[in-house]
Amino acid sequence: MDNKVIISCAITGAIHTPTMSPYLPFAPEDIARQAIEAAEAGASILHFHARDPKTGRPNGDPAVYMQFLPAVKAATNAVINLTTGGSLYMDLDQRLAPALRVKPELASFNMGSINFSIHRLARRYSGWKYDWEEPYLAETESTIFRNTFVDMKRVVKELGEGCGTRFEYECYDLGHLYNLAYLLDEKLVEPPLFLQTVFGILGGMGTDVELLSYVRATADRLFGRENYHWSVLGAGRHQMRLATLAALIGGNVRVGLEDSLYLAKGRLAKSSAEQVRKIRLILEELSFEIATPEEVRKTLHLKGADQVAI
């Protein structure tokens, strides 16, 4: 994997709402289409949430996931990565249900509780398409995104041990790296670790450029560089800048409409695939190569697409 970069793509997420962009997919056929296009553009990992097909509200029903995942699996060789974060208003049972049904090769795994607030987005828009959108955003000012050590141990046991799923460890704050180090020390998880550091969410780490190097150095110290693969997610307008900087210091990247609705300043992305194509062009112009799904499976020790319950 020397000089190769993994591109992950998060297709829809549970943050943005339909009023913010007409291109945000929430109908199953649109999620499937955008995911397939992102894989064709070069994303080797596709990260999924589900939405209510009629209103776009985040939805944790495994049956909704099964309305688009079979089409994605049939059309691509990409690694399917399901959320265990769900949305801020789901309990752990609801958050785990889709992944326990699908038994994916990879799933996101949040490494700590935080004040995950997106309430400021409610101030930027008016004329909401659906009644749920504004209160959904505004109420996050008083919401804690819970991920206790007991919760983490349950995820490891039921999804990791029970389903053979490996994890994308999402770290929104520096302390989350230490939480992961604790799980590693307790032998609850094992290398190679796939570390996804998240910058730009209110309640977590900011987007200061210096933080990238410090997070990288901290991960090296805690895990040993040979034991983990690092990826970076920059929220909103910081997406492309932080992804490019991460690649330059040995990281992998994540893009997609979950993380940013824009392709450039003032220009909405018409699909996640547009963002994949843009970051791929940047990386290849810098003489990086793009990792294939099979290279990712080998590198992250994934169980294989044939072991997924789709």
Image (cartoon, rainbow, N blue to C red):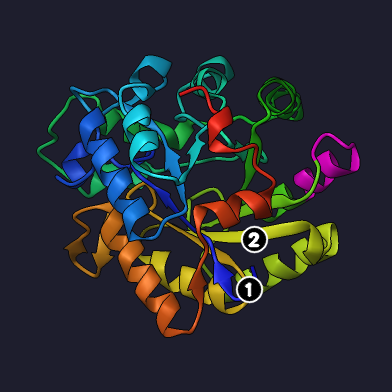
Which amino acid, by three-letter code, is at mark 2? Answer: Trp
Is 73 displayed left or right of 267 in the figure?
A: right
- Up-down relation of residue 120 to residue 159 (above or below): below
- Up-down relation of residue 18 to residue 269 (above or below): above
CB within 8 Å, label 2 to label 1: yes
* Quadrant location, the N terminus: bottom right
Residue 93, horizontal then vertical, whole percent: 56, 15
Residue 194, horizontal then vertical, whole percent: 66, 51
Verify whether residue 187 appears in magenta: yes
Highlighted range, magenta: 178-189
Give the camera-side residue of 140 and 254. 254
Q: Is residue 84 visible?
A: no
Residue 122, horizontal then vertical, whole percent: 27, 42
Write down the residue under mark 2.
230
Residue density around tag 2, few if under 14, some if 14–19, many if 20 or more, within 10 Å: many
Is 112 displayed left or right of 239 in the figure?
A: right
Residue 250 disc label? 1
Figure quadrant of residue 262:
bottom left
